[in-house]
Amino acid sequence: MPHNGSVSADLAESGTPAPTAPRRRRGLTSIEALALLLVFGLTARPGLTELFAAPVTQAWATRFVAICVQAFPFLVLGVALSAAIAAFVPADFFHRAVPKRTALAVPVAGVAGAVLPACECASVPVAGALVRRGVAPAAAFTFMLASPAINPIVVVSTFVAFPNDPAMVAARVAASLLAAVTIGWLWARLGKTEWLRLPTHRHHEDGKWAAFWAAIRHDFLHAGGYLVIGAAIAASLNTLVPETWLAPIAEHPVLGVLALAVLAVLVSICSESDAFVAASLTQFSPTAKLTFMVVGPFIDVKLAAMQAGTFGRRFAARFAPAVFCTAVAASVLMGVIWL
């Protein structure tokens, strides 16, 4: 019996095509998905008409649309500014601006985060670039936490969401900055290099404008999707869940704070729009709402995954719990002082 090489040679000589590898199954395209959605809508039209005519559904839809419409402009502006910084601001600018001494670099990086807006999705790669270019990890992590939490877009959106409560805005800025700086100092004192996997260099070959538009598309699709999910959850809590169910949790000073802290981790809303979701959770105390807005930009499901992918799982396994506990503690402290 001839060997495999002889078989291939015989097939080539005889003109018979060699067997090809099985082709991978093609996934569902967006056009096909849209067609299926339209078919479902036409088929289920009578039932959907009856469903959306119900008063409960109309109330849910009103709350859902109101949250999305209020938050959408801030989401777009925040994503655009974040993409511009990621694409056009050189990474060595941060290296020159940050002091060499770590103890001083941490608060400077926190204040810089308040000036340079970046959404959560952009702040993790920026922190990776800073570490790669020699910035102290403690300062890079402080900037990573502070930038999406207290940048000007977030401050303005919080003012709009809480128009008659300037103390909520001040409490959010103070709690977020305190938590970010605390985490930076903790890492400077307790962090170990072996926990950290240094990120590799990434370069967009098509130029800065291509990187800008790519960042906008990526961040907007991700942040917009999480905004829709968060708005749907908030509308459901206010419409579908009876007050008698939420009252024991919302009125409890500890359970209310912990419940919204966990909700912020699970929902993963963009920081430019989370204030509108928090304002809609009327059953909960101001401190619980503050906790929701402080914890979300610091750590959530998508951020934990991004941090693990950028800096390694050993880092994320220690960093995420520390950030969660610090953010909750800072929120409670500033809630007692300001609210």
Image (spheres, rainbow, N blue to C red):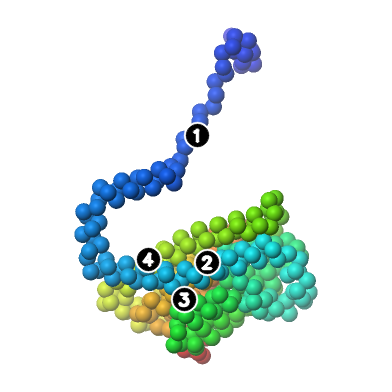
Residue 92, how many percent across, how many down?
Answer: 76, 66
Q: Nearer the viewer, residue 201 or 318?
A: 201
In three-dimensional space, the C-alpha distance between marks 1 and 3, rounded to whole angstroms, equals 44 Å
- Which residue is under mark 2? 76
In three-dimensional space, the C-alpha distance between marks 2 and 1, rounded to whole angstroms, equals 37 Å
Count residues near mark 2 (Cα–Cα under 10 Å), then give few for <14, some for 14-19, many for 20+.
some
Q: Nearer the viewer, residue 59 or 169?
A: 59
Please name which of the two marks, 2 or 4, marks the residue nearer to the observer: 2
Please tell me whether mark 2 sits on a helix, a strand or a loop. helix
At 39% from the left edge and 47% from the top edge, which residue is drawn? 34
Count residues near mark 1 (Cα–Cα under 10 Å), then give few for <14, some for 14-19, many for 20+.
few
Are discs 4 and 3 less than 8 Å apart at CB? no
Identify residue type, mark 4. Ala
Q: Any mark on residue 232, and which?
A: 4
Identify residue type, mark 3. Ala
Q: Any mark on residue 275, and which?
A: 3
Residue 96, how many percent across, how many down?
Answer: 78, 71
- Which residue is under mark 1? 24
Please tell me whether mark 3 sits on a helix, a strand or a loop. helix
